[in-house]
Amino acid sequence: MGNKRGNRKVNKPNKYRVYKRFGSDIEAAMSTKHVEAKFRGHKGWDAIKVARMYQSELASPLNNMIMTAEVNWDKSGNNAIFVQPKDVDALLKGKYSLNKLPELFTPYPAFTLCLPSTFEVNGIKPSGVLVSVHPEYESFKACMREMFTLIGAPIIEPAEQEAGIHNIMTIAYTEPSGAHCAMSYHGEQLTAIFNAKDFKEYLSLIEDAEMHDVYEAKLTEAENELQYTLIKLIVGLSVFCMAKPTAIHEGFPKVKLFSLDSPFGNGVKSHSLSTSFSTGNGTRPGEHHRSWFIRQLSHEKYYQGEHAGKAPNSRFAFVDDTLVNSKVNPKHLRTDQ
């Protein structure tokens, strides 16, 4: 990686994009000389609380959903996970089966996924992604109430028909323009979307009125494909970490010239995915590379004996990448155990 200047090689930095909080632009705007002195310098939730007095659009359902996800992130410890480019490719190509979602299928109830600067879909380069999951409706509702309290707004209860939903997942990110984007799915919707074989199947699912969240604005096909790719990446990461619980370690990625596209906020805890995925290069004639796959263990026999205390659907069997040759036995390419 890198280029040459004269006889000296100049390495490019390994840059990562982080999630930009909803109130960050509001904070910056309220620190300028154009704002009355008494309103200047407000930070975090206080900045949003003051800004809402003058900008009613801040109270939109989409913004409320994003801020509720941020409350969950704060309550969960402000965890951030970094993935390297080689791992992004492997997680998107990996195969897995999901018969039924475990109670909590992500590494943390909420976290930000810090993406390498090389990541893009159809030319769109999103920021880091905020992922928020609530196994039960009551925890989602509690976060929403807390959010309304923090911004000094009347509490709006979610629609009554939503009371029985479970496994609510919200993802939020910003586009290069600075606009915040978000989507939210829940329950059986998630299982169907996670198991979509390709983008075409995913698109048919979300175009069904019953599968599409009312908060979501009409997106272009390129934007929908970005969201599909982000979902695949988040699910691939989550399933991989369920199969290999020690795959995440504390700290930034162990790469040279590490840098962030913007500074972390206070209290963010960095974690990195640790793998030894192969790229599948270097195969010989007659060989092909079969990607890793993960099978969910759902039958009750897998939750007996030493595994009796584990939650149903929480165990996964991992099968390594393999070089397949019709004339010889398969050669396994090991990943971290």
Image (tube, rainbow, N blue to C red):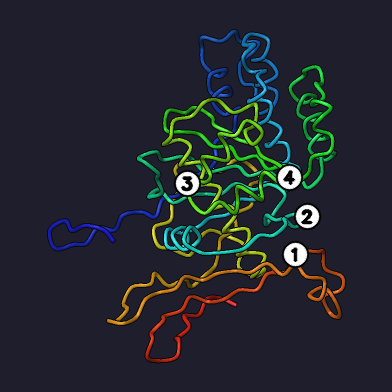
Residue at the far bottom: name it. 328
Instruction: Name above or below for residue 266 compared with residue 280.
Output: above
Describe the element under mark 1 as helix, strand or loop. loop
Q: Residue at x 86, y 80 (%)?
A: 305
Describe the element under mark 2 as helix, strand or loop. loop
Marking on residue 31: none
Describe the element under mark 4 as helix, strand or loop. helix
Quadrant of the frame with the C terminus: bottom right
Q: Are marks 2 and 4 in contact (CB under 8 Å)?
A: no
Going from N to C along the chain, the mark reached first, 2 or 3, is: 2
Q: Are marks 2 and 1 in contact (CB under 8 Å)?
A: yes
Marking on residue 187: 4
Quadrant of the frame with the N terminus: bottom left
Tell me the distance, in whole angstroms, between the alpha carbons under discs 3 and 1: 27 Å
Q: Are marks 3 and 1 in contact (CB under 8 Å)?
A: no
Instruction: Name above or below for residue 295 compared with residue 24.
Output: below
* Residue type, numbered disc 2: Glu
Crowding at dot 1, Cα within 10 Å, few <14 / some 14-19 / many 20+, comes out as: many
- The residue where tag 1 is placed is 314
Tell me the distance, in whole angstroms, between the alpha carbons under discs 4 and 1: 16 Å
